[in-house]
Image (cartoon, helix red, strand yellow):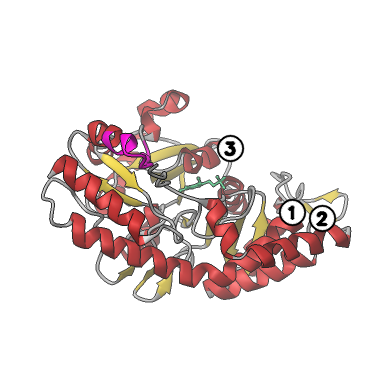
Amino acid sequence: MTDMVKIVDPHASYLDCQQDIDAAAQRVIQSGWYLLGKELKTFEQAFAQWCLTDHALGVANGTDALELSLRALGIGQGDAVLTVSHTAVATATAIVQCGAIPVFVDVDAQRYTMCPTHLQTVIETWQKKHSEPLKAIVPVHLYGQPADMPAIMDIAAKYDLPVVEDCAQAHGAKIAGKQVGTFGSLASFSFYPTKNLGAMGDAGAVITNDSTLGAKIRALREYGWQQRHLSSLDGGINSRMDEIQAAILSVKLNHLHKDNQRRQKLANLYNQQLGKLKQVTLPHVADNVHHVYHLYVVQVDNRDELRQKLSDQKIGTGIHYPMPVHQQSAFKKYLPHWDKLPVTDAMASRILSLPMYPQLSEEHAARVIDAVAAHVG
Ligand SMILES: Cc1ncc(COP(=O)(O)O)c(C=O)c1O
């Protein structure tokens, strides 16, 4: 019987370092210390070093990491924050959680990340039409590809807007050798189990080079405490990363570089073979960029038909994302606040995520390629 080609496989990632993960979890269980302890401190130091940044602060998940970053910048009720609609809904949720209004910018048609030209237009239009102050820009490094940070940082400087990078899908991605997450004032990461660096539950982190912002995140993640039981910062929540997740992430961090290399190898294989099919639009890799392929996303006409054919052949696929955030009913109330997003709107019906994770075998990747070619070729 043919076995299933999974789209992602967090269990395979566990099996890759099973002994070390089991030992790490046992160590925490036996220690009797389960939150905000030495495992978190060790992981925070290692992750900061890996990202080439001064501070990393562990939190409960990637959504909180973004919300707390915005709160640390003083963003709250009635402020407006620029981001993209072509992203995980969590990006916009974090903005709304602060009481702010998400203002959507279209994405670049090739890169799938925030379009700097449209960003400039949206800022100018917003300032003419709306009274709510623009307070920050949140670009998302989607699918493992960095957004065009040099251009976005130029616009941010022109309008004096801080930048918070959403790095949930881009651990280790770079532009001209510089890691994503080190361009803006702060950056948020998710360690959701399927991410390039995935925990075995929920976890996230904020990174920053700014000690004052780092100290604020430390307080905000625990009720605004700067001293135990004394909340001195407004806007604090409970968002602690637990010690078991921290210990597991320390083990997995040692595999991240090799895992990203494996993702690139698989992407090259897909590119070489699927590149022969003119009906398939491959992921574009921007110049001077290190893409870490959190997802391998192609575009095709008749996407749903292809998806069904692949499913019939036991090949898992995904759609990231089926409905842009600005079309989702929970966000409709902000509708008068945004411009048209033609690229975002056009993509949703054509994108398809093919299986991609470091432990995907070449045989399984070949099955995916053959099945796509047989259907569209
Ligand atoms: C782009 C993006 N931002 C934010 C998040 C939120 O992360 P989490 O699920 O850890 O809250 C995710 C994860 O799905 C994501 O992909």
Residue 19 left/right relative to 136: right
Marks 2 and 1 close (CB-CB < 8 Å)? yes
Magenta span has 84?
Answer: no
Q: Which structural element holds mark 2?
A: loop
Q: Is residue 17 left or right of residue 126?
A: right
Secondary structure state at the residue bearing disc 1: loop
Q: Which x, y percent locates residue 315? A: 35, 42
User: Based on the displayed image, in which of its 4 quarters is residue 20 positioned?
Assistant: bottom right
Cα separation, mark 3 vs mark 2, equals: 27 Å
Q: Alpha carbon of mark 2 to alpha carbon of mark 1: how far?
A: 6 Å
Return the disc, 2 or 1, that comes first in the chain's sequence: 2
Mark earlier in primary sequence (3, 2): 2
Task: State which quadrant residue 63 falls in.
Answer: top right
Q: Quarter of the image for the N terminus: give it.
A: top left
* Label 1: few (<14), some (14–19) or many (≥20) C-alpha neighbours in 10 Å: many
Relative to 279, residue 54 above or below:
below
Taking the spot 77% from the left edge, 47% from the top edge, the residue there is 223
Question: In percent of the image, x 53 and y 56: which residue is there?
Answer: 12
**Farthest residue in the front direction?**
1
Q: Which residue is mark 2?
A: 34
